[in-house]
Image (cartoon, grey):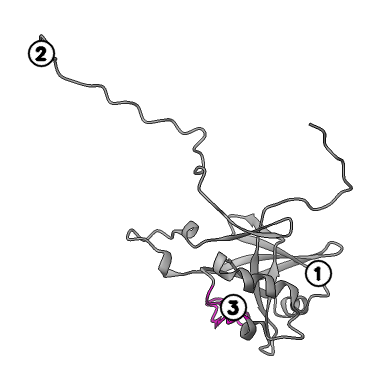
Amino acid sequence: MGKQVWKPGNMLYPLPAVMVSTADKEGNTNILTVAWTGTVCTNPAMVYISVRPERHSYQMIRESGEFVINLTTEELTRATDYCGVRSGKDVDKWKDCGLTEGKAVSLGHAPVIAESPVNIECKVTSIQELGSHHMFLAEVTAVQVDETYMDEKGKFELNKTGLLAYSHGEYLGLGKKLGTFGYSVRKKPARRKRTGNRKAGR
């Protein structure tokens, strides 16, 4: 099997397709779809998003120093795409997508998207101007989760929300479960040995 060699490019897929909600200090809000986002650190909990400076939300985030990462689901596919291809300068994305502004519990400006199963509230700690995109490094200040997906034991069943992924220009559902973390090295439970004497003649 042969391989082609291409010029350097971003071919790291799949990625989470998230909607980032923002606001400026005057109370104007917007939604930006981002695929360049991820976890940076566990303790303290930190994430990043990379945004082009020409995007309408860029100055909002830079001015307010905060944003919310809203996880998306298959039901939110159209809204996710729309908020990535339309500018908040021209349209009201909240109204056009039928989305609801919810209140963040730890931020002063940026709202959460009520229809999202998980809202990750973030405060910017630094901005790295890398080139085509600027990276906003941020600390997670609160997380809101939809109680609909809590089981009877109080566990949040995130993977039952129908999470959305983005890969090479396409939106995809996550599909079936193939394993759990650490399953490849987990020892199988030992078989229980039968006890007791067998009767003669059996």
Tell me where the magenta segment starts and ends, as one range.
97-115
Between 59 and 180, the residue placed more toward the observer is 180
Quadrant containing the N terminus is: top right
Q: Quadrant of residue 137?
A: bottom right
Please tell me which of labels 3 and 2 falls first in the chain. Answer: 3
Q: Nearer the viewer, mark 3 or mark 1?
A: 1
Name the residue at 52% across, 34% down: 184
Q: Position of residue 14 (x, y in %)?
A: 67, 53
Q: Are marks 3 and 1 in contact (CB under 8 Å)?
A: no
Q: Which residue is mark 2?
A: 199
> Which element carries disc 3, helix, strand or loop?
loop
- Please, what is the three-letter code of the amino acid marked with disc 3? Leu
Q: In whole angstroms, how far apart are the C-alphas of marks 2 and 1?
A: 79 Å
Between 182 and 24, the residue placed more toward the observer is 182
Please tell me which of labels 2 and 1 falls first in the chain. Answer: 1
Query: Does 105 appear in magenta?
Result: yes
Q: Quadrant of residue 106?
A: bottom right
Up/down of 190 relative to 110, above or below:
above
Q: Which residue is mark 3?
A: 107
